[in-house]
Image (tube, coloured by chain):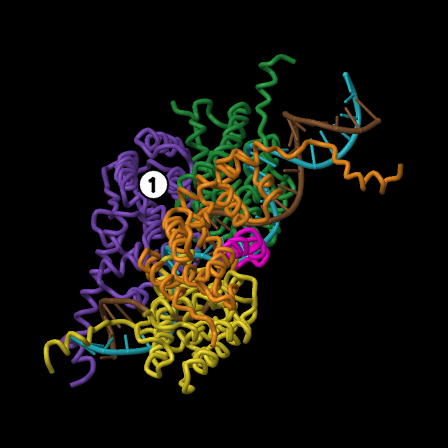
Chain colours: A purple, B green, C orange, D yellow, E cyan, F brown
Amino acid sequence: MTQEAKKLESFTPGRRRSDQAHRAILQAAREVLEQVGYQAMTIEAIAERAGAGKKTIYRWWPSKAAVALEALTSQTEVQVLFSDTGSLEGDLLAYFELSFSGLRGKSGTVLSGLAAEAQLDPEFAREFQRTFIVPRKQELVTLLQRGIQRGELAPDTNLEVLADLIYGAKWYRFLLYPAPLDDAFAREIVKLILRLRSEA
Amino acid sequence: MTQEAKKLESFTPGRRRSDQAHRAILQAAREVLEQVGYQAMTIEAIAERAGAGKKTIYRWWPSKAAVALEALTSQTEVQVLFSDTGSLEGDLLAYFELSFSGLRGKSGTVLSGLAAEAQLDPEFAREFQRTFIVPRKQELVTLLQRGIQRGELAPDTNLEVLADLIYGAKWYRFLLYPAPLDDAFAREIVKLILRLRSEA
Amino acid sequence: MTQEAKKLESFTPGRRRSDQAHRAILQAAREVLEQVGYQAMTIEAIAERAGAGKKTIYRWWPSKAAVALEALTSQTEVQVLFSDTGSLEGDLLAYFELSFSGLRGKSGTVLSGLAAEAQLDPEFAREFQRTFIVPRKQELVTLLQRGIQRGELAPDTNLEVLADLIYGAKWYRFLLYPAPLDDAFAREIVKLILRLRSEA
Amino acid sequence: MTQEAKKLESFTPGRRRSDQAHRAILQAAREVLEQVGYQAMTIEAIAERAGAGKKTIYRWWPSKAAVALEALTSQTEVQVLFSDTGSLEGDLLAYFELSFSGLRGKSGTVLSGLAAEAQLDPEFAREFQRTFIVPRKQELVTLLQRGIQRGELAPDTNLEVLADLIYGAKWYRFLLYPAPLDDAFAREIVKLILRLRSEA
DNA sequence: TCTTAATCGAGACGGTACGTCTGGTCTTAGA
DNA sequence: TCTAAGACCAGACGTACCGTCTCGATTAAGA
């Protein structure tokens, strides 16, 4: 019997154990995040709660930020939907409502912690951008493209930069500027977007 | 002088705060930031280089982030100018050029470190907003108001939110999105701003 | 009159030492000793409680041990009496009773702290010996001399060394050996002393 | 194998205590003691010299006194011999000679530091008594018992108290009284001991 | 009465070491 | 072979006191 065949039968107790440990670690990370927040979370606390060795965690994740990122993104509730409501205004307002309410909870704290970690750890920054930041922006660009198709935005609009403006406003208020992420803010953003006209 | 006036002088006994130590600490902080960056900077290193006791630093600043913030903002070179070039387009492009070039240097690294710290330390977040974020946004709003006065922006434009969009795009790319802060980006932002028409 | 001559007159203008501050410091020292013990007592705590500056304490005493020593010896209750009861046995038992009971209280803790300090600070060691250890031993020698005069001890007994043995036993149990300083111990010491016979 | 035997194995997972680190720490402590003395010795200096983390030291010893005690007693040269010379006088003089000369060197300084620490730290006091003070006194009692067997001391002599007197005299002069620990002192003590007669 | 200088309370200062904490690695016995 | 436990090295943390140094205010003698 080949090595591969053996692995497929999943006879080796260690391997089964490792999947279990994997899930236990993510679950423990979620619980620790819930209880003490991102800042106070430590690898040691996760290991202790998961009944895992620290080495086991370091084997699969390079940093506590990476664990937190996977713990966050593996939760289905965090998934943001970019739905098609039939109009650009509706799409944007629906997106903002879901997104803003998500940031107000515990996962908002975790997300700002991850954004912080990305500043301090270049390796994690790349991972965070690859799995979180870039895909979400791409979905926003897709949403805006529907606006062009419907004739709500000028065809020559630079959607990449427009998405930077929209996402930027959201993150700016979320991370830096002391003003709330509320419906009024969402409406004012949408109002400005809709005032864009085509270049003369 | 009356009795009341004398009392108002608020006599504080004991040795006064040493301006020399204060300046030595900020200078040392700048040097350490220059040499090892924000992340690797420690209070111990600052104290040693400044010839100051750690207690003296903790007496006047609550955290290393607070020291770094004052070290950064007390440098005249970091001051960003919002000059009046005669047109909104010129004002914005001039601002972006100065701002983007500032973020590319060492002070950019420090600034992203401070932004990170603000996520992890609520007390510092408030200080960072009060002394850095909010005043700068106010200056941008003033710049945009000149645009309204010149007739380049519609009078009913929500400048607070427009400033959130502009600053947001800058910070979004600076902190999160893997794309450069270059002249092309500046021009595309300006192009979009100038396409805003009045509501009607 | 020359400058030197003036100096020789020991002319001292300026404010004189404040007896009030002096007494307040000793009183504060006694209170701090009572509350937290010798080990945890600090010059800062004494200064704060006395409403005195630290400098004022350092001006008059070289160390916290010196303050504690004066605070201890300036209390009249601590004075040990070497009374004349008419017999060597009586004198010794009377002395032991007073001495042992004194060591069991708070002042015992202070005294062991001072003994400790004397090991660590040679300058204080000399002061402690001069004002505390040596005078007390001399009084014990005087007590023993009465024993020779009464014929209870042989005239050729080396009283210096006998006093070392007696005081030594007391301090050994007080500082080092885990056995109580009680009446039984006193009686056994006296019993041994009285069994000394003259040489030859 | 019995149940009890199995229990005694007391399974403890994880990395075991490193004997190498243990020995390196004690050796470093000895070197630091030799160079700067007990008073100036710090845990940090030991850790640095031993190439050990401070945590490793704190894991196994509660205080610098505990490290110094083990560093001192694990040196074979410090062992004091209570030899049998055939007479009480000879045994005592031999003991005093060895003991006094030991106290005059570096280890004397360490020992007085430990005696000081025992006054300031009750937990260390118990350890110091258990491993150092009490065993040594027991050996002295054994030495004195040989004196009774040889008929040099009365059979009804209270040896515990006599040992307190002898050890006390030594420690009294060593720690407190400003007079030398020399041969003359040893001879005078022995002369007094030998003058004890039986009660009758 | 004014001058002079040492005193006072207060507390900031440069330092040192503390004991704790976290990170990331290494070692061990058992599964 | 891999896991859980946890000891290991390393070094920054923030705290506690140390003993010294400024301050302005106070005090008391001599001029």
Relative to residue C143, is residue A77 drawn left or right? left
Helix, strand or loop status at disc 1: helix
Of all residues, the one furthest to the left in this rendering is: D2
- Which region is colored magenta? C120-140
Question: Residue C41's x, y, as percent?
Answer: 46, 46
Q: Residues within 10 Å of mark 1 (few under 14, many from 20)?
A: some
Whole-percent x, y for residue D178 in the image:
56, 62
**Which is nearer the eye, A33 or B63?**
B63
Q: Residue at x 47, y 40 (%)?
A: C76
Left or right of residue A101: residue F19 = right
Residue at the farthest right position = C1
Up the image or down, A151 lies above or below B37; here it is: above
Provide the residue designation for mark 1.
Answer: A148
Residue B89 or residue B5, whichever sits in front: B5
Q: Nearer the viewer, residue C56 or A29?
A: C56
- Asked whether C62 or E14 is in front, the reply is C62
* Horizontal and vertical percent position of residue A160: 40, 46
Q: Quadrant of the C terminus of chain D?
A: bottom left
Q: Is residue A37 above or below residue A22?
A: above
